[in-house]
Image: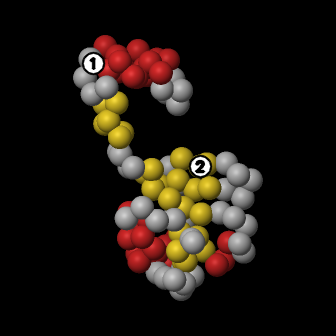
Amino acid sequence: MQNLSFGAALKVVKSGGCITRQGWNNKGMFVFQRPSDTLVPGFIPKVKSLPESVKSFLVKQNREIEFLAYLCMYSADGKIVNGWLASQADMLSNDWMILD
């Protein structure tokens, strides 16, 4: 499906799909949602994406920690950008597409 508004494309992402823009010139970039997750206390020390100071704080809480869902982008250079934010141009464009 092509020529979607950002709002329509966002619904696709929230249901587990991937989206891209025609305006990105087919550079392989796309957006997806990383789903929410709950970490049990014993797993927190194994999380590579948290600094040691944060892990130490969370372990002392001795409770499950909820990670909320967020948007990510697969970039043109093959890296994942966590916490991707749409620009005003992205939000106002109507060239969003569902990635096959």
- Residue at 41% from the left image edge and 77% from the top image edge: 8
Residue situated furthest front in the rendering: 100
Image disc number at residue 23: none
Q: CA distance from mark 2 to mark 1?
A: 29 Å
Query: Picture coordinates of residue 9 (x, y %)?
Result: 45, 74
Query: Picture coordinates of residue 48 (x, y %)?
Result: 53, 26
- Residue at 27% from the left image edge and 18% from the top image edge: 61
- Residue at 48% from the left image edge and 26% from the top image edge: 47
Task: Please say if 73 is above or below 36.
Answer: below
Look at mark 2 in the image and give the residue it sits on: 81
Residue situated furthest left in the rendering: 63
Quarter containing the C terminus? bottom right
Tell me whether circle 2 and circle 1 mark residues in contact (CB < 8 Å).
no
Q: Earlier in the sequence, mark 2 or mark 1?
A: 1
Query: Picture coordinates of residue 51 (x, y %)?
Result: 51, 23
Look at mark 1 in the image and give the residue it sits on: 61
The quadrant holding residue 15 is bottom left
The answer, for residue 90, to whether it is visible in the render is no
Mark 2 Cα within 10 Å, few/some/many (few <14, many 20+)?
few
Element under label 2? strand
Element under label 1? helix
The quadrant holding residue 66 is top left
Q: Which colour style is shown?
A: secondary structure
Residue type pointed to by label 1: Gln
Q: Nearer the viewer, residue 82 or 99?
A: 99
Residue type pointed to by label 2: Val
Q: Nearer the viewer, residue 92 or 14?
A: 14
